[in-house]
Image: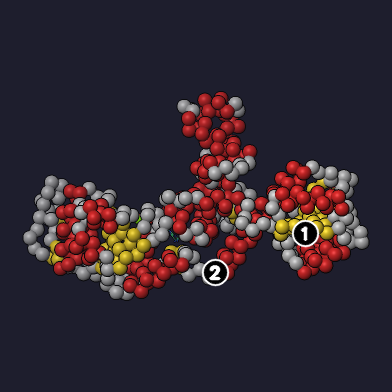
Amino acid sequence: MAATPPKVIVVDDEVNILKTIGICFDSIGFDTQLYAKPQEAQEVLRREKFDLAFLDLKMSPVDGMELLAEVRQHAPETTVIIITAHGSIDSAIEAVKRGAYHYLQKPFDFKELQLFALKAWEHHELKSEVRGLRQLLAESKDKDWGGFLTRNREMQAVLELAATVAESDLSVLIEGESGTGKELVAQFVHQSSGRSQKPFVKVNCAAIPENLLESELFGHVKGAFTGAVKDRQGRFELANTGTIFLDEIGELPPIIQAKLLRVLHNKEYERVGESHTRQVDVRVLAATNKNLDEALEEGTFREDLFYRLNGVRLKLLPLRERPEDVPLLIEHFIKKFSKDTPLEVSAEALKVLRGYRWSGNVRELENVMQRAVLVARNGVIERTHLPEEFLAAALRADHMLTLEELEKLHITRVLQQAQDYQKAAEILGIDPATLWRKRKKYGL
Ligand SMILES: Nc1ncnc2c1ncn2[C@@H]1O[C@H](COP(=O)(O)OP(=O)(O)OP(=O)(O)O)[C@@H](O)[C@H]1O
Ligand SMILES: [Mg+2]
């Protein structure tokens, strides 16, 4: 429950019922106003706004239906619950059609009322959260920095800095966990620089075996080593007059660190197996998902090289530290992956997505949304369309799951553990065709 209690109005001309409701709501910490006279309540409803309104249906001279109309007009965001006696269910249903959230049938017991009220409050909170997010989406003119979307102040400052230094030839060190958008920022810097029409060459330092790295970066001549069947240009040469992006720089072995320092310092290098010195003009961007400060302390990364690379340092926050970006990126990826009309995300799914840890950051979010768009039907992404870990996390956090969600979680676990499909169906006590249908439904 939220920190501030909900503001609640209860209107019922039966004073005993009114008192019972009052005591019940006090016991769950609601901030409640009770009215036995509907005319008085009508006045109040014109002046004040409430989170929840419990309105008796049969009252005079003003009945619950009229009060409902009043609320819908003055405070449409209020969640209205109609209290109704047995026998007037039809009118209660009519009230729901006119915008009441639900109806509560008399007589009710204390526990039932408590549960009902808490549920209504939860519904109200979710609704206002969704409304707030929608408004945020609508209001903000989202500036994007070469496709990098963010609403986080700190990140916006980082990207403004990136835009400013792009025009210089300063080297830039981009730091951030895996999937936080380092490559996107590197591309942005290149695109915003005077070298944008020149080559942008990427080298993933961790993906190339140590014995090939020197030749990869600086090239080689025929016969320099076994397998060097002809002369070959290195990445520095290919990037000449443009930008080179050295990804995962923290993985560079010491020998290569020394050679890199030289080219950064003198703009000179030699191809492997050649004594002729070549000149090169490149802008260097580097990225790391490791903490280089630690590598410096341990002595595994050269300090002089670090200072060369670190003309400007751009630190990208992990996604969990900028939750305001989650809805923005969700919308972005839904648009990217939807063929026709973009899907919506249910309030429950959004809540789970916002609370997730995102250890794989934006890349993980992108994958989750791509999959959700594929499996969602009826135009809405529900919690069941998210990977199993999300449901498991919700379960651990003691969130209540729906039966469907529990079913999905359970089927996933059985499928993981059973040796084969037939066995899984047997364990679940259903026939294989049913299992197949359920897998399809949940996108397993
Ligand atoms: N802020 C953002 N706005 C839009 N798309 C983003 C954003 N950040 C990342 N992406 C997208 O997420 C994916 C991962 O980003 P990117 O490859 O730049 O991350 P990275 O930090 O280089 O990851 P790694 O360390 O795994 O190489 C890409 O598809 C990228 O376009
Ligand atoms: Mg990358």
Nearest the eye: 348 or 146: 348
User: N-terminal of the two: label 2 or label 1?
Assistant: 1
* Residue 303 located left or right of residue 44: left
**Element marked by disc 2:** loop
Which residue lies at the image location 36% right of the left edge and 74% below the top edge? Answer: 164
- Residue 79 image point, x, y percent: 73, 57
Q: Quadrant of residue 37?
A: bottom right
Q: Quadrant of residue 173?
A: bottom left
- Amino acid, disc 2: Ser
Q: Callout 1, which amino acid? A: Gln
Residue in the foreground of this view, choosing between 342 and 354 = 354
Q: Residue placed farthest to the right in the image?
A: 61
For label 1, the residue is: 33
Residue at 84% x, 44% y is 107
Q: Which residue is mark 2?
A: 140
Question: Which residue is more in the foreground, 307 or 230?
Answer: 307
Looking at the image, the residue that sits furthest to the left is 275
Quadrant in the picture for residue 177 = bottom left
The spot of residue 174 in percent (x, y) is 33, 62
Q: Disc 2 and disc 1: Cα gap in Å?
A: 37 Å
Please state the horizontal and vertical placement of residue 144, each as a whole percent of the image.
46, 68
Tell which quarter ligand 1 is in: bottom left
Judge depth for marks 2 and 1 and give the one in front.
1
Disc 2 under 8 Å from ligand 1? The reply is: no
For residue 82, say whether it is visible.
yes
- 156 to 426, vertically: above or below: below
